Image (cartoon, rainbow, N blue to C red):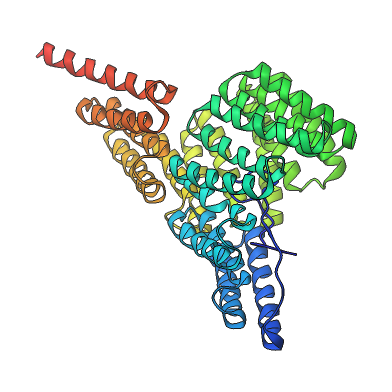
Amino acid sequence: AREWGVLPAARPGVAEGSCCVDTWEGGGGADGAVFTNIGDMCEQAGVFFHEVGVQSQEALRMHEAALDSAIAGHGDNHTLVGVSYTNIGYVFSAEGKYDEALFQYQKSLEIKIHVFGCESSEVAMIYNIGAVYKEQGKYDNALVEHQKSLKIKIRVLGYDHQEVASSYCNIGMVYNSQGDHENTLLQLQKGLEVKLWIFGCEHPKVASAYNEIGSVHSFQGDYENALGQYKKSLEISIKLYGQGHPQVAAVYNHVGNVYAQQGKHEEALEEYQKSLEMRLRVFSCDSHNVVALYTNIGNMHVEQRDFKNALIQHQKCLKIFIQVYGCDHPKVAEVYHNMGTLYLRQGKNQEALEQYQISLDIRIRVFSCNSLPVAESYHDIGTIYGAHDKYERKEQALEHYQKSLEIKIRVYGQDHPSVANSKYYMGLVFVRHNEMVMALDLFLKCQQIYSKVHGPGHSETVKAADAALRTRQCLEESVLER
């Protein structure tokens, strides 16, 4: 068997257990075999470059070489050609180039349909298109794609199949992004019931389903139910693996996250420490599984205003990532970004600005000028400038917010929550400088986007509406004073 897309990492927005496996017969004679071997080497090199975080252009170059080799050896409609289109799409998706990713995934899908037919399980197992629509904020389109997949799976595989459970999860995650938590939980519960039917009560996939449901409850602020789901997952994981297993450590980390959201910082630190100790017994101290805990522990020290220990944790992360990946890597940029946020919390704006600028420079080198991580850096630099009353700082704030906004619009389109968020922060800058007409226009646009995406009752929509109302009141008061 050969995977339809050989990247080992999970696709963005794709549920656990959603790998797409395709059986195929090697062919094309001796020449075809040669081209297959060359293509395989290029494909694996592309995967390697992507996994170790080398600039995405290298990964893309190797996948394109694999594509050329597959077409030369097998023609346009062979499954190996589809593999390459899928992997090229994944590189584009990771860069935030979603339209290019969709184009590649669509080509892969067309080959699947040509080879297997429309009503095949192979076609049903294409998740990438729906996942990209979700990342773009095109939730209705994402639901259509995932529901198409679900219907085919039910017809071909029956209701009680793990791929059906995965589709329920994917649909649930789209609803979650829309803020429709009731439908999210309904879909995840369906997925859990299928997994319980197939695997029984004590299975890793059932534990994973409890984790997913717990994360939704946590996001809703329903912390008691979240902890209840994580407890079920923890009991299964301990029974299956024993206390010191990484899966058990992962659940302790989830529990720590819930306590952190509740503001119970001591309890969160205790859970994070448990998780860290378990992971250190299994992984080396420079493993990414361990470094993630340093970050969480550092964040808790920040919340406790223990900035000295927080900085120590972030510096541990930075040292390990530079040793493992070198200076120009996304993870290194992320740590500089976290350190910037740490300095910002202390009111050390200049130090924060320096860290954010280092992070931005790395992200521009590693990704491209129009990637979402770059947009994040521009936004945070804008926030530092936006906190000042001086006019020149206002211009710098708006310049950086505008750069961030332009990238987000290019990636997501106009109607996305992240676009609304940028408009909201730009509105705050105008409020600070008493330019209420400009502020009101931005808050109203922000409210319109949130209402369209989340609905009028969503907390973000209400926040934007409240900002617009208060700004309008200020305008009316200024008119009366005249």
Image coordinates of residue 309 in percent, x first then y, are: 69, 30
> 60 or 32: which is nearer to us?
32
Image coordinates of residue 334 in percent, x first then y, are: 58, 45
Vertical side of 219 occupied by 168: above or below: below
Tell me the quadrant of the picture where the N terminus can be found.
Answer: bottom right
Image coordinates of residue 174 in percent, x first then y, are: 52, 38
Extreme bottom residue here?
30
Residue sitting at 47 percent across and 57 percent down? 102
Extreme left residue here?
482
Residue sitting at 57 percent across and 30 percent down? 184
What number of labels is visible?
A: 0
Whether residue 305 is visible:
no
Left-right relation of 125 to 355: right
Tell me the quadrant of the picture where the C terminus can be found.
Answer: top left
Left-right relation of 327 to 351: right
Residue sitting at 41 percent across and 46 percent down? 412
> 37 or 260: which is nearer to us?
37
Whether residue 373 is visible:
yes
Q: Quadrant of residue 450?
A: top left
Residue sitting at 72 percent across and 24 percent down? 229
Vertical side of 273 occupied by 228: above or below: above
Q: Quadrant of residue 434?
A: top left
Image coordinates of residue 300 in percent, x first then y, are: 66, 27
Vertical side of 248 occupied by 166: above or below: below
Q: Quadrant of residue 443?
A: top left
Vertical side of 353 occupied by 86: above or below: below
